[in-house]
Image (cartoon, rainbow, N blue to C red):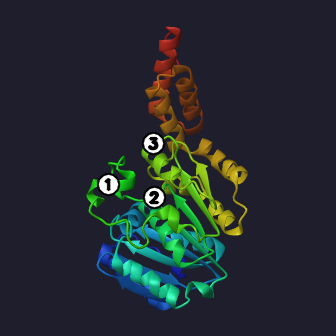
Amino acid sequence: MQDGLEPYTLSLSDLSPDQWLEEMQEIGESCGFFEPLGNRHNAAFVEKGDTLLVSFESLPAIQALSEAARPVGFDLARANDWSCLTVISNRDTWFRDGEVYGFFDQMTDDGFFDDFDQVIFFGAGPCGYAACVYSVAAPGSTVVALEPQATLDARITEWDDRFTHMRRTDFSDRYGYAPDMLEAAKAAYVIYDPSDRLGAMHAALFQRSGVTRFRARHLGGGMQAHLTQMDVLEPLMTEAASGTLDSFQFARHYRKRREHALYCKKLFSVLEEQERPVLAEAVCAYIVNGFGAPRYRRKLKAMRQARTGEVDTD
């Protein structure tokens, strides 16, 4: 680990996966602990404040989404002076592994979570599933899950054909069905994209007492990256931790999508597919005026010419 640097601010970029894990091991051993969990998972704990963030992340996503190749849990914990337990998979595993079960069993038996005033679980997609199921190890915790799957058990979600390579993985044993595992949570927040049909079907399975669902239309598939780029992930986590996150606050933060070029471009594509030329032209003009975007300037010129029959000389 680089001398004199605070662990949450270290840059871990330009490292191979093995080198990256070696650095994380040094961070954990210097500031808390580091524990390999079999061949596919590792856990790194950094002790800071009296609130613990338990973040589930995959190494490929960390290295792809962060310029510093730093877990998003580190950035969220740093902003709030929280302790952080980061559970890392070497790929999307949904954390279905006996070594991971045993780790959380041991944390519960040791009273690890009882040492903190508050525990917050976080993850996105397969990691959001893990955040939900392992929250049962810390009753009274808060959970924030972005577009999580409820289960990949084909007997329940046979309609989801995206992850057929996971069909042989058992989702029916311990730490299995995510909505049920949230029963001991103080509060759970599920954020999903209603325009993503399969993701919305999973989100519907979370409709139960204690779970609040928020709709983030057109952000499905990479929602964590979008919310981070919009600078709203950290305040959403802070408000979830304080118990002040509600529909009004989420809507207030989500208005920042209007300043997010990728959201606007996705909205434009949807309107084009729906053959709604008036709205598509309005959104295209908004993109050009707000973000420049030469390609969209050409699109706007062509749309106006098609509508008026006149040559746009702008």
Amino acid type at circle 3 is Arg
Q: Residues within 10 Å of mark 2 (few under 14, many from 20)?
A: many
* Residue 95 percent location from the top left of the image: 38, 70
The quarter of the picture where residue 90 lies is bottom left
Residue situated in front as seen by the camera: 30 or 242: 242
Q: Relative to residue 140, is residue 3 depicted above or below?
A: below
Instruction: Report which residue position mark 2 lands on.
Output: 150
Dot 3 or dot 2: first in sequence order is: 2
The quarter of the picture where residue 290 lies is top right
The quarter of the picture where residue 240 lies is bottom right
Local secondary structure at mark 2: loop
Q: Residue at x 47, y 57 (%)?
A: 148
Instruction: Report which residue position mark 1 lands on.
Output: 163
Q: Residue at x 40, y 79 (%)?
A: 101
Q: Residues within 10 Å of mark 1 (few under 14, many from 20)?
A: few
Q: Are marks 2 and 1 in contact (CB under 8 Å)?
A: no
Q: How far apart are the alpha carbons under marks 3 and 2?
A: 14 Å
Left or right: residue 63 compared with residue 71: left
Amino acid type at circle 2 is Ala
Image disc number at residue 197: 3
Image disc number at residue 31: none
